[in-house]
Amino acid sequence: VSTTFQYGLISIITGILTCLLFNVMFKAYSTVKNIHKNNRLLFNIIPIMAGLCVALIINKTDYVSVGQGKQGVDDMLSGKYVYTVKNTISHIVNIFLTFISGSSGGLIIPSISIGSYFGFFFIKITSLPLLPTIIFGMTTVFSAFFGYPLASACIIMNILNQKVDSLPLLIICAYIS
């Protein structure tokens, strides 16, 4: 199977997973928002409970589920750090709880880190190289979530200081997702 076909398949799978994940997040957020409007007591309790759940997850995963932003991605790209299923699920749950509770946890960097997780796990099931696969995961999740494929490809390439050699394929995969 060609490398281009594998990256196209990764783009499709990542796009579907991203749409499912973020649709569930937005529906849960809307539900919690309606609960907030109707009950003043829950307006204060829900963010506190979500924060306690996030703190519990952080303690149980030895602070790995917090994510280290660009430094964490750089460590993964250099091979210093290996994500596990537990860390990945914990990080996604933290993002989910933070988002639905109405807290400001951001969406841009979390979507990029989720993309790096997806890319990292595709390496485990394919024979694709580490760096490009993680970059494709990051770009396709970012593109699927925000709907700007060209911008997502350029932003990821800029953040990671990559050459423009793979930009055409990256843009195509961003459009596919």
Image: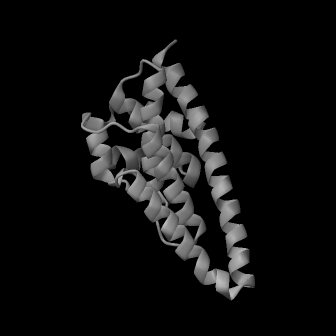
Q: Position of residue 102 (x, y in %)?
A: 57, 73
Q: Is residue 71 visible?
A: yes
Q: Residue furthest top?
A: 1
User: Does residue 127 appear to the left or right of 29 in the view shown?
Assistant: left
Task: Please determine whether, in this image, residue 41 is positioned above or below residue 126.
Answer: below
In front here: 148 or 78?
78
Identify which residue is drawn at 51% across, 58% down.
95
Q: Residue furthest bottom?
A: 40
User: Does residue 94 appear to the left or right of 144 in the view shown?
Assistant: left
Task: Please determine whether, in this image, residue 59 is positioned above or below residue 4.
Answer: below
Quarter of image, res 146: bottom right
Q: How many marks?
A: 0
The C terminus: image quadrant? top right
In front here: 23 or 47?
47
User: Does residue 107 appear to the left or right of 16 in the view shown?
Assistant: left
Quarter of image, res 46: bottom right
Q: Position of residue 101 (x, y in %)?
A: 58, 70
Task: Please determine whether, in this image, residue 165 is positioned above or below residue 58.
Answer: above
Identify which residue is drawn at 49% across, 69% down.
52
Identify which residue is drawn at 38% across, 39% down.
83
Q: Position of residue 34 (x, y in %)?
A: 73, 76
Task: Please determine whether, in this image, residue 177 is positioned above or below residue 90.
Answer: above
The scheme the figure's colours follow is one colour
Identify which residue is drawn at 54% across, 30% down.
10
Q: Is residue 160 visible?
A: no
Q: Position of residue 59 (x, y in %)?
A: 39, 58
